[in-house]
Every structure is written in structure tokens, then in C-alpha cells.
């Protein structure tokens, strides 16, 4: 077939969903243009490890041109898509225009501060490499500043770390931060003594890790508390000025660090497309992942709003995005072959969150368990899911080193 007559698929976003769709279309008689504002795929579930000085960014990200080097029907373009003309079927990107026959929008999500400007301005977040490095630099600086602070109250505020959000990211970050203090910083700052350092986990609702069964929620609390994390449930954050956390009931906590993990919404660029959005700014799609009235446009992952059988929106998880990437790719092939697209059904692979060394909670194939076995599964699953053999080996060696020597190796404060 003449290359000019091949259908052109534009995929915007090379995260979990977009990358899966692109790979699934590798053997199809089509041309693909994959666009991302970054030149790498980021493994977001391990971003918190960058923030707590456990891994370097290059171990959780992988260059897209390397990933797709051998995929002959794909061209990668780095750039920011700023608008889409659905009638004329083209995307606009940093001055250039790219026409499509089919479009896959997999632009992911961003942190949702729910309009709390003070928290956005003064708090830290984990969403991309830049924010994780910024958090790491700040955390490490707090220990340096505390080491030369003679005023006890001021020193305690420097050593108080508040994590907001009792979902898996908040739980993982709080556990890892507590271990950074008790395993590593205690050795780096022998004169300081770390008994006054605090990690506080705030959660507005009654429970941590809400979607997990009761048994695992309890295990999570027990494991976090065994690592000296203070858990405040039913506690809302009202304000943060960079020095004091104000709680919903007016109480204040002096803290120079607040890490916000309590909200996600769909990527900002969707707001300007003039298409109906549902909860968290996600775009409502048909069960086939097509945009209503635009059968040539597919939206997936964090950007898409689709309900599960129980009327709840599908969670913003990599597993949903990957499975949707597969289905979107398959549906485009079906349409090209003159067949009907198929609906998406999410197959829940289970839940898994780590709380630190030897400690994780898991629900797999309907069985709940916690502790060492869950942690071993978490370690191997994350190593397996990382892109690139080199990264897998490096992360494995890094974690083994940290495990044996109680170290976090990436304790560099860099200029931003
Ligand atoms: C800290 C953290 C921890 C997480 N932990 C877990 C976990 O343990 N398990 C789990 O299943 N999920 C986890 N998630 C959620 C998971 O990462 C997301 O659900 C998943 O990444 C969504 O995939 P996606 O393909 O929709 O979007 P993403 O993977 O976010 O990819 C979107 C891509 O689009 C690109 N992009 C966005 N806008 C534009 C634009 N205008 N132009 C060009 N490119 C653009 C971005 O650069 C990005 O590469 C975590 C998320 C975070 C932030």
C-alpha cells in the first residue's frame, strides 16, 4: 500500500495509555505520530522514590525514541499540543499542525488542589520529575537547616513533615519519609538526634486507602504507626502558609513541609477543547472509548470519564490506562477493517501499596494480605513494570543496596 493512503493515527500523550496503544498498533498497516511534551515515558508510581532520595529520575523514566526505535510505522514528535480542530481533524502543536484520520487523546492528569491557592503555592506535589526533584531538594535542605538551628521550636518545625492524602501515594510517601529519617538521616546528623522529627499523615475521610478492605486499612495504620507516622483521619486541611498548617478545626501545626497527594484531575488542555467534561475534568466517553459524535476520536486513561458497572467512575490508575490503550488500539483496527468497535470492560488486577521496608498491603485475586510477602510482590512487580532492562537492573541494585545498608543513595541537593 502507498504510504500516503495509509490511515494516520495521532496519539497525544506517551504515558501509560498512549504508549500501550502505540505498541498495540505496531503491526497495523497505518502511520502513527506519537506526540508528548516530554521526550520520555515516566513511571509515575515510583516518583515518590525520587522525592525521598531513593532513586534518580533516569531510573523511573525512559526515552521515547529508544522505546520506539524499532517500530517502523511510528514517528515521535516532542511538543505540546495546544488545541484540536475536531471538524477539520488536526491537532496544533507549538506552531505546527498535524492532520489525523484517527486521534487518541491520552494526556493524563494533573494535581488537583481544589482551589486552595495557598497549598498550591507553598506545598509540594508529586506529579512529574521536576516536582519530585523540587520536593527532594527541599526535604534534604530541611535537615541541613535544622542541623544549624539552635531554637528548639524552630528546629522542630523544620523537622515536621506533613503529607496530605491517605491514598496509596500519601501512604507510600509518609512511610518512605519516616524511614528516611529513622534509617538514614539519623546517621547523617548524629549530633542532631531525630526523636523530635515528625511525619504526619492527614486524611479528610474516616479511613486511609479507602478502596481497600477493612483488614488492609487496619494493617496500613498499624504498619505506618510502627514506623512512627502520626495518622490524623477525619482531619481536613484548611490552609498552609509555608510555615503553619491550619486544620479544619482551627488547630495549627508548625511545619515547613507539606506534600499534597490528595487530588488528581484531568489534564488542563482538555478544558479548552469545548467538549463536555464530567467529574475531575475528565471527558465523558462512550463505552468503546470514542468521543460522542466523533467516532474517530478516542480518549483514555486519566483524561477519560467512564463508569464501572456500579455507577462509579473508573479510578485514575495506570492499570485502567493500559487496558484502555489496548482497547482503543484494537477498536481502531476493527474500524479500519470495517468491523464494529468493542466496549471496554475493566479487569481489576488488585491493589498494592508499600509502606516501607518489609511492609506492604495487597489484595490480589480477592485475597488480602500484608507485611513481608506483600512487600516482596510489590518490589518485583514494580521492577518488572519498569521500562528498560537497564533501569530494572539499576533499580534492583539500588534497592538491594539500600535494603542491606539502610541507605538512600541520592541525597544530593541540586540547584533547580
Ligand atoms: C505520584 C503518583 C503515584 C501513582 N501511583 C500509582 C500506582 O501505584 N498504581 C497505579 O496504577 N497508578 C498510579 N498512579 C496513577 C497513574 O500514574 C496514572 O493513572 C496514569 O499515569 C494515567 O495514564 P495516562 O496514560 O492516562 O496518563 P499519563 O501516564 O499521565 O501520561 C500522559 C502523558 O501526556 C503528556 N501530555 C499531557 N498533556 C500534553 C499536551 N498538551 N501535549 C503533549 N503531551 C501531553 C504527558 O507529558 C504524559 O507523558 C500514580 C500517579 C502519581 C502522580
Image: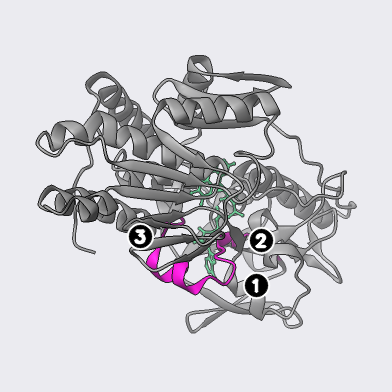
Estimate the spatial distance between the alpha carbons at disc 3 and disc 2, rounded to whole Å.
21 Å
Number of labelled discs? 3
Extent of the magenta region: 103-129
Coordinates of residue 389 in the picture (x, y in percent): 39, 32
How packed is label 2: few (under 14 Cα within 10 Å), some, or many (20 or more)? many
- Pointer 3 residue: 130
Say above or below: 85 vs 341.
below
**Pointer 2: what residue?**
303
**Residue 342 on the magenta segment:** no
Which is more toward the observer, 311 or 88? 311
- Secondary structure under tag 3 reads helix
Task: Give the Cα distance between marks 1 and 2.
Answer: 8 Å
Residue drawn where x is 64% and y is 56% of the image: 302
- Position of the C terminus, as image quadrant, is bottom left
Q: Earlier in the sequence, mark 3 or mark 2?
A: 3
Q: Are marks 1 and 3 in contact (CB under 8 Å)?
A: no
Q: Name the secondary structure under disc 2.
A: helix
User: Residue at the location (42% across, 20% down)?
Assistant: 358
Q: Position of residue 214 (x, y in %)?
A: 69, 28
Residue ID at (66%, 53%): 301
Q: Secondary structure at mark 1?
A: helix
Task: Please give left or right for residue 273 compared with residue 137 in the image.
Answer: right
Amino acid at each position: 500500500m502507498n504510504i500516503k493512503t495509509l490511515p494516520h493515527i495521532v496519539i497525544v500523550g506517551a504515558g501509560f495509555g498512549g504508549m500501550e496503544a502505540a505498541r498495540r498498533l505496531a503491526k497495523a498497516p497505518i502511520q502513527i505520530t506519537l506526540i508528548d511534551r516530554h521526550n520520555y515515558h515516566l513511571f509515575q508510581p515510583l516518583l515518590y522514590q525520587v522525592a525521598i532520595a531513593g532513586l534518580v529520575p533516569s531510573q523511573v523514566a525512559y526515552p521515547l525514541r529508544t522505546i520506539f526505535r524499532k517500530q517502523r510505522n511510528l514517528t515521535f514528535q516532542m511538543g505540546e499540543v495546544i488545541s484540536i480542530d475536531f471538524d477539520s481533524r488536526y491537532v496544533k502543536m507549538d506552531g505546527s499542525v498535524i492532520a489525523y484520520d484517527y486521534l487518541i487523546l491520552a494526556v493524563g492528569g494533573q494535581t488537583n488542589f481544589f482551589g486552595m491557592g495557598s497549598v498550591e503555592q507553598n506545598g509540594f506535589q508529586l506529579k512529574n520529575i521536576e516536582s519530585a526533584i523540587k520536593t527532594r531538594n527541599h526535604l534534604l535542605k530541611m535537615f541541613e537547616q535544622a542541623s544549624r538551628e539552635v531554637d528548639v521550636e524552630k528546629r522542630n518545625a523544620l523537622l515536621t513533615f506533613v503529607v496530605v492524602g491517605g491514598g496509596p501515594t500519601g501512604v507510600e510517601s509518609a512511610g518512605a519519609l519516616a524511614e528516611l529519617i529513622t534509617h538514614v538521616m539519623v546517621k547523617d546528623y548524629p549530633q542532631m538526634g531525630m526523636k523530635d522529627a515528625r511525619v504526619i499523615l492527614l486524611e479528610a475521610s474516616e479511613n486511609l486507602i479507602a478502596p481497600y478492605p477493612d483488614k488492609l486499612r487496619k494493617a496500613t495504620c498499624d504498619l505506618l504507626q510502627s514506623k512512627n507516622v502520626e495518622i490524623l483521619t477525619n482531619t481536613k486541611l484548611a490552609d498552609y502558609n509555608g510555615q503553619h498548617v491550619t486544620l479544619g478545626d482551627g488547630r495549627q501545626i508548625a511545619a515547613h513541609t507539606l506534600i499534597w497527594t490528595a487530588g488528581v484531575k484531568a489534564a488542563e488542555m482538555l478544558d479548552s477543547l469545548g467538549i463536555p467534561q464530567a467529574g475531575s475534568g475528565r471527558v465523558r466517553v462512550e463505552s468503546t472509548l470514542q468521543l460522542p459524535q466523533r467516532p474517530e476520536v478516542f480518549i483514555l486513561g486519566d483524561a477519560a470519564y467512564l463508569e464501572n458497572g456500579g455507577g462509579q467512575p473508573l479510578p485514575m490508575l495506570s492499570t485502567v490506562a493500559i487496558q484502555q490503550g489496548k482497547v482503543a488500539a484494537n477498536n481502531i483496527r476493527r474500524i479500519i477493517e470495517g468491523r464494529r468497535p468493542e466496549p471496554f470492560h475493566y479487569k481489576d488486577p488488585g491493589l498494592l501499596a508499600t509502606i516501607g521496608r518489609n511492609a506492604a498491603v495487597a489484595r490480589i485475586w480477592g485475597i488480602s494480605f500484608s507485611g513481608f510477602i506483600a512487600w516482596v510482590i510489590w518490589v518485583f512487580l514494580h521492577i518488572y513494570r519498569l521500562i528498560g532492562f537497564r533501569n530494572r537492573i539499576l533499580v534492583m541494585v539500588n534497592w538491594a543496596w539500600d535494603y542491606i545498608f539502610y541507605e538512600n543513595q541520592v541525597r544530593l541537593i541540586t540547584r533547580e
